[in-house]
Image (spheres, helix red, strand yellow):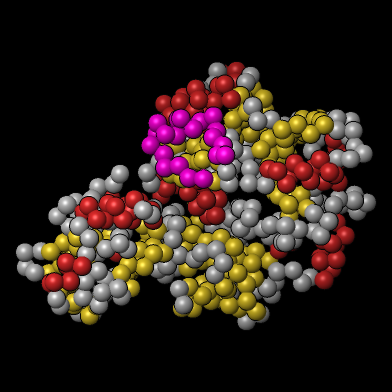
Amino acid sequence: MSNIPSELKYATSHEWVRLESDGTATIGITEHAQGLLGDMVFVELPDVDDSVSVGDDVAVAESVKAASDIYAPVSGTVVEINEELEDTPELVNSDAFGGGWLFKVKLDDASELENLLDAAGYASSIDED
Amino acid sequence: MTNKTVLHAKHLASGAKMVDFYGWEMPINYGSQIEEHHAVRTDAGMFDVSHMTIVDVQGTDAKVFLRRLVINDVAKLTVPGKALYTGMLNEAGGVIDDLIIYFFSDTNYRLVVNSATREKDLAWMTKQAAGFDITITERPEYGMIAVQGPEAIAKVGTLLSAEERAAVEGMKPFFGVQIGDLFIATTGYTGENGYEIIVPETAAEDFWQKLLDAGVAPCGLGARDTLRLEAGMNLYGLDMDETVSPIAANMAWTISWEPTDRDFIGRDVLTAQKAAGDQPKLVGLVLEEKGVLRSHQVVVTEFGNGEITSGTFSPTLGHSVALARVPRSVKVGDVVEVEMRKKLVKVTVTKPSFVRNGKKVF
């Protein structure tokens, strides 16, 4: 069973969201998702200042095995991207909930977070996979 | 019903992630397939290939039977232990399987065929054997371990006695020798030096453990695929199948046209294809920018479309490479386009081989 931190919110499409103290949201993919994809070789990220809406395909995680779309779990404006992933995409494998974060969004509507799953909800959603 | 190799417990003990591979529960990786890939290119790695099918063909007619069955000519094999790579065709000239044949004597050969094609291979061989004085015997009581990489031979050497080491020392490529319990062959599927070792099931776990202790990294099917693709070696079912001529699968070099009176299965079809010159060909494709070429992507060329048969990210090169079947007029050095995720991306055509002995070769 992979690690699912209780302080994060989750989308059924395997993104995690962490609400930061400055009101932005950091987004990544879960440990479970990186395990399914295998060794990451490229990560295509959105551009800073891009406007994203819930469900948009905004990034691509490409592993040795497959290319997988990453969907925006919340709406807002991209304020930062994880440039480390350009040279070290394997951070997504080794530290999915930390150094492997993908991008940060300034939220349009913080109440959207309530539509996401908590850790228990995500755990049961991946049990059904 | 899932088959397990004799090394199944060893894989679990090494933390393998297991997947179903044509009915066999096999390790896909032991953590990181890229690290396993690098272990083989820079040091030594090992693969459990016990799922592969070993078939002994023996009897008075063994030689004449195999000269009919496969496109290469086993009459070229005269030194005991010598092996050749070849294909077995149907009457329409399509590849039923690719295989290695070891020669022991004119009445004794050992074939190693793919596990995914085991049943149809055995059925085809049995059908073709009618009228020949031979026996076809599957040898499931053996395990097989491929040890590959620049340090593979030295590391295997530490497990052998001085006498045994002398027996394998300096063995040329595509050769095998029986040493006690072990059949050690200088074959492989990675483009590196190393051995494929056939070991009795009862001794397989112990031998695997000794290799682990000697510092050989266990490697899964994931690394096996990226290594073979970098080496430009075909994978049956992707790069060729029963609908594909060996001429269209970079296997023409395994066809022995001489002597002209050798009537191998598919010969008339291949002869006509060769005369017509209209078969597509298998080439390499190199993508230097971001992205990974994948099987079944369309290749757009000025001579018509082709298709990627297998593609991957090359851990050695740091970018994507692929094998693709394209119109014969496409040349090495041409720039063609691949349809990737709804965009056309430019790629360069190369010979279908990318890495040998750790080095870029295109």
In the image, is residue B259 above or below residue A115?
Answer: above
Q: Position of residue B168 (x, y in %)?
A: 62, 27
Q: Position of residue A55 (x, y in %)?
A: 30, 73
Q: Position of residue B343 (x, y in %)?
A: 46, 78
The reply to whether residue B169 is visible in this rendering is: no
Q: Nearer the viewer, residue B32 or B252?
A: B32
The reply to whether residue B261 is visible in this rendering is: yes
Residue A83, quarter of picture: bottom left
Question: How many circles with numbers are drawn on the protein?
Answer: 0
In the image, is residue B30 above or below residue A74?
Answer: above
Q: Residue at x 77, y 72 (%)?
A: B278
Residue B303, quarter of picture: bottom right
Question: Is residue B19 rendered magenta in the image?
Answer: yes
Q: Residue at x 53, y 76 (%)?
A: B337
Q: Position of residue B52 (x, y in %)?
A: 62, 39
Residue A21, quarter of picture: bottom left
Question: Is residue B136 rendered magenta in the image?
Answer: no
Q: Which region shows up in magenta? A: B1-20
Q: Nearer the viewer, residue A111 or B330?
A: A111
Q: Residue at x 81, y 40 (%)?
A: B126
Q: Quadrant of the N terminus of chain B?
A: top right
Residue A97 falls left or right of residue B225: left
Q: Residue at x 25, y 47 (%)?
A: A3
Residue B289 falls left or right of residue B113: left
Q: Quadrant of the C terminus of chain B?
A: bottom right
Q: Nearer the viewer, residue B187 or B207?
A: B207
Residue A53 falls left or right of residue B237: left
